[in-house]
Amino acid sequence: MRDQMTRDLLDYWELVEHDGIPAQKPPPEDSAKAARHAHDWFEAVYGTKAFQKPWKSAESFRAAFKQIPQQIMQEEHVEVLPTLPTEVLSMLQKWLVSSASRLGTGQLWPLVKWATVSGPWQLLAGISFVDLPGFGDANAVRNRIAEREYNRADFVCISSRIDRAATDRASLEWLAKAVRDLPEGSCAYVCTKSDDVSLDEVVRDNNLPSTTSRAEAARVRNNKVKEQVRSMCPVNVYTVSARDFARCMGRDSSTPETFLNTDSTEVPTLIAEMVNQVLARKVRQRTQLVTALEAKLQVMESQLRERPGADFNAAALQVDLRMMVSKLEAQLKICSERSQRDLSERRQQLTVCARDAAAEGKRNLSSQAQHYGSATTLHWRRHKSLVDHDGKWDAIDIAEDVTALVLRTLDRHWIVHFNAIPNVGLDLNAQICAEVEGLVRDFVGRLSAWPELKEHAAGIGRAMAAGVSSMLEEEVEDFEAFLQERRIGYAEDVKEAARGQLAVHLYDAKGYAGTGSFQQRKASVTSHLPKVDLRASVAKPSERIKLVADHFGRASRKMIASTLSQARDCYASFWDGQKQRSQKERDTKVALREVLQSELCALVKEFGSAKQCRAPPKAA
């Protein structure tokens, strides 16, 4: 961390060609954002007294901050098990919050990489809440942490204060990324401090009666904010008040100021959605394991049953089954082709949308070229650094700006298609299961003359259908995992592709240096930037959905092949069962079947029927 901060600060002072390293803080400009953050970090860790005089060189600066302050190194590390919320808060404040009494000598919070709080909260069993610094942070280390945890998350909450929730650019960009990257229902927008409301202002702006209560005014303001956010992103929005919630719950001695009951604070509703979404995924994964095991045991148990004796034409029945399986194969191929056509049409639609988005972005390139070229307000040194670094320098990113309009246009279609694609796999799953159940019914119907044999065949068929269903669920789960891998990060692909082109089109501008070069460099940017081919950038989303379609094609063929194999083998005992078996073989089968029946009973008793496990428990 210290090395990163040192680089950020020294790089800035080197860029502005300052003589030595001054003690004052870099100016409040976008180009100095990382340097200002680094300055704050050094002051926090080493204390404000460390910046009382300048340094003659970068080497002397590094030498001055080579060691961590002695008083911090001597801090006693003690494990404490707090029992009250106030004790937890006191510990967190010591390690994570700035202390006015230690501003001069150095503090602990900048050195804390990770803080974990655990407790006996049964509702949250197996669930971890991670508070992230957010993307776009000036610090690269925190950016990497945010990206890692974001990719792991089952559910993402983006938070912003209620008074700026509909205009907070950073939070709204985070929200757009989450809605774009994650499966439907995997994120929420949380507007905090919703109890903080100006009653007179809300009454005046909304023509409300003078008798309007503070709670009613807050609800009106909060609903307007929800509508504004939802008009930008299709997401659940919560306007919460942690302070009034704590007061309603008796965790604060004060009286609630705005919301007089817990439900109106929307905190319980938010917790319920987060917990239920996460538990739904965990329950689904566990259920699939139980279902797969139960199905395998049922198939094994059914194959060990002794077929009832009956005088039937096994050869004719075997021919009938082959014809049924051939009919099943033809029908499954039709279902698969229908699903693949659906994906192909979505791919074509997205390709057309991408092309239209690129054309719209192309029309905007001339104004971007003016902004970063002849009309730029950047200092010549910063402009040169921006060009030399292929359009990305500190907080300025030309690739992000030239693709912003493209992504806004394309996002809507990307989200709609990727939210719908999982249903293609689920629909194929349902169609295959229905066709398999139809085959079992038809085959069992041929045995009406032999009731005991018919019941035996029905039991074997049910076990086979359960095994097929379990196999299909695993394949669909794998497909959805692949789909999520292809969904996340497409916008970053588009930006990187544009950045690669910028390196080519800014090459001419990089050649201008020396007296009078600033005007020539600006003119070169104005001339060459509109040549960026955004169609090449938006080819990335089309490539991703092609990979999805290809993967689905392979998965559907595997699903059909496995289904047909199980259907062909299902009634094998009907043909080879005609052979005479020794008493020892029959006794062994009976013993094995008893063991399997015992295992099945234990499984059902432990987990309940797998079908009953599908709905997760609702959070209170």
Image (spheres, rainbow, N blue to C red):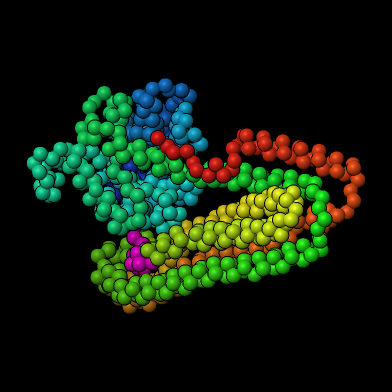
Residue 86 quadrant = top left
Q: Is residue 400 magenta?
A: yes
Give the vertical position of 84 relative to 111 (above or below): above
> For the magenta stretch, what is the residue range?
395-410
For image coordinates 30% across by 70% down, the residue present is 368
The quadrant of the image that shows the N terminus is: top left
For image coordinates 55% across by 55% down, the residue present is 481
Q: Nearer the viewer, residue 117 or 267?
A: 267
Q: Nearer the viewer, residue 102 or 170?
A: 170
Give the vertical position of 473 relative to 100 (above or below): below
Give the vertical position of 470 relative to 47 (above or below): below
Query: Given the current orientation, which residue lies at the most extreme left position?
Result: 210
Residue 560 placement (x, y as % from top left):
65, 63
Residue 389 quadrant = bottom left
Residue 296 visible to the viewer: no
Residue 529 placement (x, y as % from top left):
35, 74
Residue 157 visible to the viewer: yes
Query: How many callouts does the rendering have?
Result: 0
Position of 396 compared to 328: left or right? left
Residue 367 placement (x, y as % from top left):
28, 72
For image coordinates 28% across by 29% down, the residue present is 248
Residue 313 quadrant = bottom right
The quadrant of the image that shows the C terminus is: top left
Query: Given the current orientation, which residue lies at the most extreme front position?
Result: 449
Q: Nearer the viewer, residue 156 or 572?
A: 572
Magenta portion: prevailing SS class: helix
For image coordinates 20% across by 32% down, the residue present is 257
